[in-house]
Image (tube, grey):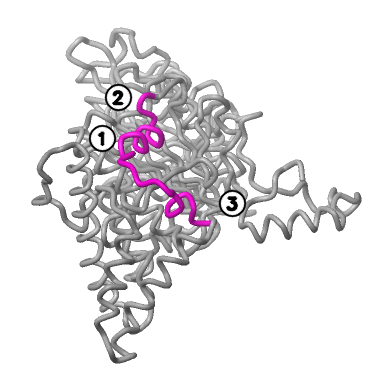
Amino acid sequence: MSHPATSRATSLTPQQPQLAGARRIAHVVSVTGAKAVAVVERSTAGTDRRPERIEIGAVTKIATPRSVVIGLVSSVSSAMPETAESQQDLELVELSLAGEITVGWDDRLAFARGVANIPTVGDPVFMADSADLKLVYMQSTQAAVEIGVLHQDATIPARLLVDELLGKHFIVVGTTGCGKSSALTVILQSILAEYRHARMVILDIHDEYQQAFGDKAALLDTNNLQLPFWLLNFQELSKALASTEDTRDTEIEILGEAVLMAKRRYSEAQAGRLRKAPDNAGITVDTPTPFRLSDVVAYIDEHLGRLERVRSTLPYRRLISRIEAFIADPRYGFMFGSLVIEDTMADTLGRIFRIPAGGQPITVINLASIPAEILDVVISLLSRLAFDLAVWSQGAVPLLLVCEEAHRYAPIGHDEVFMPTRQSLSRIAKEGRKYGVSLALITQRPSELDPTILSQCSTVIAMRLSTERDQEVVRANTHEGAFDMLDFLPLLADREAIILGQGAVMPMRVKFKNVGAGKPSSTLHAGFSSAWKNRHFDVEHLGEVVKNWRLSTKSKTSA
C-alpha cells in the first residue's frame, strides 16, 4: 500500500479493496488453517521471469473483499521445474497468515493480529512496500523502543512493544558468538533511553556487562556486595550449610531448631536494648530477621555435649564444621563474613534494586567470582528478593531480572542441587506479571532449560541456532502461526534475529543496532593470533596469579 498509517481509507472499502500501484506477484491456490499457498505469476512485460524476488520472511499482502491480509513467506518452491520441453516452471509460495489491515472506526487504516477475513482461492497476492511495513510495524498507539532495522527494508526501524515484552517475559536464544549479549545490551539501552526510572538487575555469570551501560549501571561483586546470610530462607540456608552425606536430613532438622532459637534470641536482645517486650510469636525459620551464627553453633554444641555415641554426634559435628568453614573462608565473606550483625535489609534491597536509582537504574551483579558451591543459593536469594519486594510493595516497584546462561542454574529435570533457584525463577515466571516483575532469560541451550520457566516467555528473540534439538524446543514454545520461520535459524548472520511473540507487532526478521563502545566483552584475551606473537606473561605475572588464586580473588586488569 502506498498510503501512510494516518491517511484516510480512500483506496480501501469494506466491500472492495483498491490496490492501485501495488506489485502483484501471485494468486492464492490453497488455504489450510493459518497457511496459504500461492502460485507466482509471470510478468506481462514481454518476459517469462517473475517481476519480484521472493525470499523467506518477506511480508506480503492478500486482497480480500473486506480487508488486506498480511502474510509472511515461509517457503518457496518449484512444483514443476523448468525443462527443455517446457520453458515455464510453476513456482509456489507458502504464506503464514499473521494479521490484517482494516478500516477503523475513525476511517483510518489499522493493523491487528489475527485474521477475521480468511483469503480464498484466486485472491491476489502483492509484495508489501515501505508504506505497508510502516503501517504494520510502526504503530503509534503502543509504547515501543527501536532495536534495529527490518531485514526486508533497512529504512524501517524494528521495534519491540515495551509492556508486552516485559509484562509477559522474554527469552534470547542463540549459539555461542552470534551476539546474544550484544542484542540484550541493545534492548536494555533502548529501554533505558526512553524510561529513566526503569529498574533492572543483571545476573552476570561471565562478567560481560561491566562496560555495557557506562555510568548508568551500578556494578556489584563480592568486593562490594553484602548479602547477609540471615536473608536466606531455610531451604536456601539448608542448601548451603547441610552436607550432602547420608546424615543430611538429620542435619537439616538440627539446623532448623538452632536457627529458630538464634532468631528468637536476637529478637529478645534487640527488644531488651530498646526496653520493650520481645515479639517472637511470628518468627519462623523463614522470617528474614537477623541472627548470629555463633548462637547457632552454641546451640548445636550444647546438644552435642549431651550425646554419647559417636554415630549420633556425626550430624552435629558436620554442621559445626561447615558453618565454621564458611565463616573462615574469605570467598564467602560477602555473605558470612560480617563481624557485626545488624538489620540492614532495607539498605541491601535499596542497593541491589536501585531504590533510589540515583542516576543508575541498572544493577550488574558479577557472579563470576562467587564460589560454585553457593552460586545456586545466591541466585535463588536474589530472584526471591526481587519477587518478594514486588509482592510486599504491591507492585509499586516494577523491575526486570535478567538471567544470563539461565540453563546453568535452572536446568531441566528434578535435580535437588538446583531446586531453590528453579523454584524462585519459576515463581517469577508464573506469577511475576501480577506484581510487576519481568524475567529475561539468555541461553545458548534452550533444550536444557526448565520447560515450566521457558513456557512462560511470551516473546522469543531467536538468533542463530544450529542444534536441531534446541530448534525443536524453541518451536514447541512458540505460539505463532509463523513458527516456520524458525527453520531459517541456522542461516542467520551475527546480530540478526527472528522475533516472535507478544513483544512484536508481528513476527519479524531484524538486524540489531551496533552497540559500539558499549559492547559486552565476550572474552578476556585478545585472541590466540595476537597473544602468541607477543610476550605478555612472565614469571612475575604468574606469581601474582598464584597469590590472587590463593586469596580466591580475580587478578586485576593491570596485573
Verify whether residue 508 appears in magenta: no
- What's the residue at 27%, 43% (across, down)? 387
Give the magenta part as a residue range: 331-356
1 or 3: tag closer to the N-terminus: 3
- Can you identify the residue that label 1 sits on? 436
Figure quadrant of residue 480? top left
- What's the residue at 30%, 48% (across, down)? 384
- Disc 1 secondary structure class: loop
Disc ID at residue 82: 3
Q: Please provide percent x and percent y for residue 446.
A: 43, 57
Report crowding for label 3: few under 14, some 14 to 19, many 20 or more residues within 10 A (C-alpha): few
Q: Please provide percent x and percent y for residue 404.
A: 48, 48
Three-letter amino acid code at disc 1? Gly
Gap in angstroms between the C-alphas marked 1 and 3: 58 Å
Quarter of the rendering occupied by the C terminus: top right
Q: Nearer the viewer, residue 48 or 79?
A: 79
